[in-house]
Image (cartoon, rainbow, N blue to C red):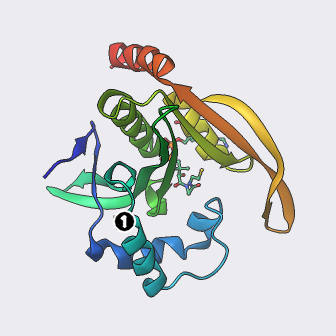
Amino acid sequence: VFLIIGNRLRLRAIERSDLARFTVWLNDPEVRRHLSLILPLSLVEEEDWFESMLKRPLREHPYVMEIHQNDDWVPIGNIGLMDIDDTARSAEVGIFIGEKSYWNQGYGTEAMRLILSHAFQTLNLHRVFLHVDETNTGGVRAYEKAGFIHEGRQRAARFDDGKYIDVLMMSILSEEWKKVDQEQGNAN
Ligand SMILES: CC(C)(COP(=O)(O)OP(=O)(O)OC[C@H]1O[C@@H](n2cnc3c(N)ncnc32)[C@H](O)[C@@H]1OP(=O)(O)O)[C@@H](O)C(=O)NCCC(=O)NCCS
């Protein structure tokens, strides 16, 4: 099996048998809050998403994040690249940790570092970007720790919990990532 392996977690391909777990995660109000999901999600709709995902280029298939626990691999969330642009060599990244008990333990940052290494070292991309709600303090912090740079703000781009909020745009270029990766490698 081809896996992307980090210090504390690994990324593997999604199987049909993961979909029931994803549906539970994505119906949790706290998990979905910053994912622009506002309507209840059924297993059938998630299966539909899976079928259309399979038709997209292989490089854009998301991965399951798993952590090693008691000799077993435990799924905690998803991460993946979207809309890879072969001319600009650019892609958007999306992430969520569905198991809330694993938030704020550095797994989001590590998963981002892994997917960036995959994007720059394996896929030879030049730019990876993301959108994050201004109210998603933990997300913004995780992306800053992984080396993302703030590049813009979309005003009132989302309506969340009765209020318009801004969406922050962040990105990292391959040369910036190389520097961050070297510094972090030396720090370990
Ligand atoms: C966003 C997400 C992926 C981040 O992953 P994570 O594993 O929780 O993040 P990390 O632990 O690597 O980093 C979070 C950082 O934010 C900090 N943080 C979290 N909440 C905070 C708050 N309210 N105020 C200040 N800092 C906060 C944490 O302490 C940590 O920083 P530290 O390591 O310097 O202490 C995860 O929380 C998640 O999946 N959330 C729900 C879905 C989601 O929002 N997805 C992203 C959409 S863009």
For the C terminus, the quadrant is top left
Residue matched to label 1: 55
* Label total for image: 1
The part of the image, by quadrant, that contains residue 57 is: bottom left
Label 1 within 8 A of ligand 1 by Cβ = no
Please tell me which residue is depicted at 34% across the width and 18% down the height of the picture.
185
| SS for callout 1 | helix
Residue 9 to residue 36: above or below: above
Please tell me which residue is depicted at 22% across the width and 57% down the height of the picture.
73
- Binning the other alpha carbons within 10 Å of mark 1 as few (below 14), some (14 to 19) or many (20 upward) gives few
Is residue 135 found left or right of 91 in the rendered image? right
Three-letter code, disc 1: Lys
Looking at the image, which is closer to me, 134 or 63?
Answer: 63
Please tell me which residue is depicted at 40% across the width and 52% down the height of the picture.
60
Please tell me which residue is depicted at 27% across the width and 60% down the height of the picture.
74
Looking at the image, which is closer to me, 167 or 111?
Answer: 167
Is residue 109 found left or right of 21 in the rendered image? right
Is residue 36 found left or right of 17 in the rendered image? right
Residue 12 to residue 163: above or below: above
